[in-house]
Amino acid sequence: MKHIAVAGNIGAGKTTLVKKLSAQFGWEAHYESVEDNPYLEDFYEDMHKWSFPLQIYFLHSRFNQVVSIKETQKTTIQDRTIFEDAYIFAKNLHESGLMQKRDFENYFSLFQSMSKQVSPPDLLIYLRASVPKLTEHIAKRGRDYESSISIKYLEDLNHCYEEWINGYDLGKVLIINVNECDYVNNPEDLSYVFQKVHGELYGLFEGN
């Protein structure tokens, strides 16, 4: 059993890539809980009020996913990691003044306890995308509650992502520049991604 995860900002194209990789390689897919999330719409209307319960919901959901992945014998691919919840989204909310210090400290303490019980992915695929590309993707998928996402919020998240990925040392990382690689509309780009992922996995798992 191997665990692959796709990381990236809102609108980077994680879910689409997870679906395509899952179909190509026959992996079991685990998606982010978005459509049935009871806090998401409220959060985008009032981030300060709903930041803590939203992040707790995501943390709990992601922890359950990782536990499930750990118990399965199948190779799995995950849409976003538990590490992003803490080091990107909760951190940014706290630094932006949208999550109180005591809430963030409580949240992060819980994350640290949970993270001791799980393993990082064998391969992390990071989708790097500029803010204009993110807003283009967000507009195309047309979720009403995402229409209020500000450019500043996406910029801050991108900054956190770059800081996190530059210091990530928990396992193998494959970075895909979404600005230059249109795996949704260009079959050649999709084939390139398949080859890169296959190559990373072959090198990583050879002899296992």
Image (cartoon, rainbow, N blue to C red):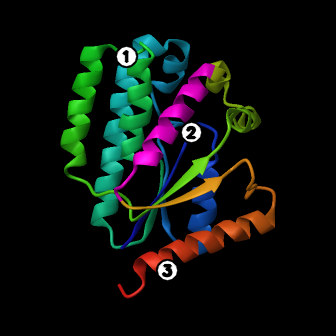
Q: Residue 31: give x, y in percent of width and height.
A: 49, 50
Q: Residue 187: give x, y in percent of width and height.
A: 79, 66
Q: Earlier in the sequence, mark 2 or mark 1?
A: 2
Q: Is residue 150 left or right of residue 1?
A: right
Q: Amino acid at mark 2?
A: Asn
Q: In the rendered structure, which segment of residues is drawn in magenta?
A: 152-170
Discs 3, 2 touching: Cβ within 8 Å: no
Residue neighbourhood size for the residue with mark 3, other residues' Cα within 10 Å, grouped as few (<14), some (14–19), many (≥20): few
Q: Secondary structure at mark 1?
A: loop
Q: Secondary structure at mark 3?
A: helix
Q: Residue 101: give x, y in percent of width and height.
A: 28, 15
Q: Earlier in the sequence, mark 1 or mark 3?
A: 1
Q: Which mark is residue 202?
A: 3
Tag nearer the camera, 1 or 3: 3
Task: Decide whether residue 155 is among the magenta residues.
Answer: yes
Between marks 1 and 3, how big is the CA–CA gap? 42 Å
Residue at the (19%, 49%) spot, across then down? 116
Q: Residue 3: give x, y in percent of width and height.
A: 40, 64
Residue neighbourhood size for the residue with mark 2, other residues' Cα within 10 Å, grouped as few (<14), some (14–19), many (≥20): many
Q: Amino acid at mark 1?
A: Met
> What residue did someone put label 2 on?
9
SS majority, magenta:
helix
Q: Secondary structure at mark 2?
A: loop
Q: Which mark is residue 121?
A: none
**Quarter occupied by the C terminus:** bottom left
Q: Earlier in the sequence, mark 3 or mark 2?
A: 2
User: Is residue 149 visible in the rendered structure shown here?
Assistant: no
> What residue did someone put label 1 on?
99
